[in-house]
Amino acid sequence: MNAESLDTNTITALVTDAVAAPSLHNAQPWVFRYVRDTGVIRLYADPERALPHTDPENRGLLMGCGAALFNLRVAAAAAGLTPRVLLLPDPASAELLAEVHLSGTGPSDDTLAPLAPSIRRRHSSRLPFRDEEIPAATKERLSEAARLEGTELFFPDPWHVRSILDLIRDAEESETLDPGVHEETVRWTRTEPSTVTAVADGIPGEAFGPRQRNASVPARDFAVGRPMPGRDSKAFEENPNIALLGTARDEPVDWVRAGQALERVLLRATADGLVASITSQPLEWQDIRWAVRDPVSAMANVQMVIRLGYGPEGAASPRRPVTEVLDFV
């Protein structure tokens, strides 16, 4: 298969897998454009889906787009294509994040295609996990997944995990005092189930998970004080498995790379029978973000806090129709 033979159905299928990626508040801040003459898929950030109070630097937005880019790479490899990616190819266009050149020739990355079945299985799980340690070999596979994307995955010691939980609580208190953050959370999360609202973005009520009875894991409570009849509370794991994903530098291109690394880690975790949830709460406040990193590690900039473990899979959040995010030119 080569660039000239790619038809509308093939490109649509690739982008359908791409948009299964996670994004901040499931805002799905991406637009894809297929250039027929060159066989290139362009990925753009969608500024209309930014969260200026929650994500003032658009770091989370670019990470979400990076996660979608990684899914696109996996889907292309599974279709027998070789994706070649150029990040931030046009300095004059801040919204153009990547160009993906697709061909049926050239060196292939054999690590990509095996992750394809995990794309549709991966969902954030905000449910209680079992208090069970992750084997060292599994942790190493996850760390290697991050390294393949030029990032680092670090598993902090128990004392550091406790400090991270404290920082998350500090971030939650800051959020309650910021009306802009509160408004964005209410806008993009809905206490009703998706079957009632029929909305194709944001986080539906069934994906919130129960309230934490012991407040022991890093999971944002999207209800933010809103009533949710029937929502119960449960005890979560006392000793959560936490990983920090980080980069050496902290520029927009690093955020796109971190998003790709995040999705590679999450797909690898799904393939290994793990479930996960992610949070960036303490990273959204500059006065406490620096404290999330472990001072004895080489990680310079933490980009995401990941909770991993064994337990029930989370509910799927809705996705917009591909026709809303894909153009052909």
Image: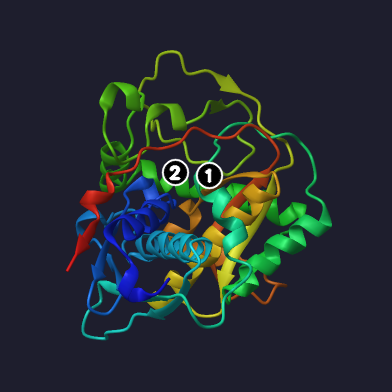
Q: Residues within 10 Å of mark 2 (few under 14, many from 20)?
A: few
Q: Is residue 129 above or below residue 262?
A: above
* Residue 27 place in picture, x, y as percent: 31, 49
**Residue lying farthest left?**
329
- Circles 2, 1 touching at the beta carbon (< 8 Å): yes
Closer-to-camera residue (327/204): 327
> As rendered, which of 251 and 67 lies closer to the eye?
67
Residue 169 numbered mark, or none? 1
- Percent of width and height locating residue 57: 33, 67
Residue appearing at x 44%, y 27% in the figure = 206
Q: Which residue is found at the position 47% from the left and 18% from the top?
A: 231
In this orientation, does residue 289 appear? yes
How far is mark 2 from mark 1, CA to CA?
Answer: 6 Å
Please give the name of the residue rendered at 74% of the width and 41% of the height, measured from the top-left corner. 239
Q: Which residue is mark 2?
A: 173
Q: Amino acid at mark 1?
A: Arg
Looking at the image, which residue sits at the far top? 230
Q: How is the image coloured?
A: rainbow
The image quarter in which residue 56 lies: bottom left
Q: In this image, 147 relative to 77: left or right?
A: right
Is residue 106 rendered to the left or right of residue 251?
right
Position of 160 with respect to 3 (left or right) is: right
Question: Which amino acid type is marked by label 2?
Answer: Glu
Image coordinates of residue 273 in percent, x first then y, are 69, 44
Task: Looking at the picture, tell me which residue is in the foreground, 262 or 122.
Answer: 122
On screen, 314 above or below 48?
above
Circle 2 SS class: helix
Question: Where is residue 292 shown, x and y percent of the image?
Answer: 58, 61
| Along the viewing direction, whichever of 5 and 18 lies nearer the viewer | 5
Tell me, yes or no, if residue 251 can be seen here. no
Label 1: element kind: helix
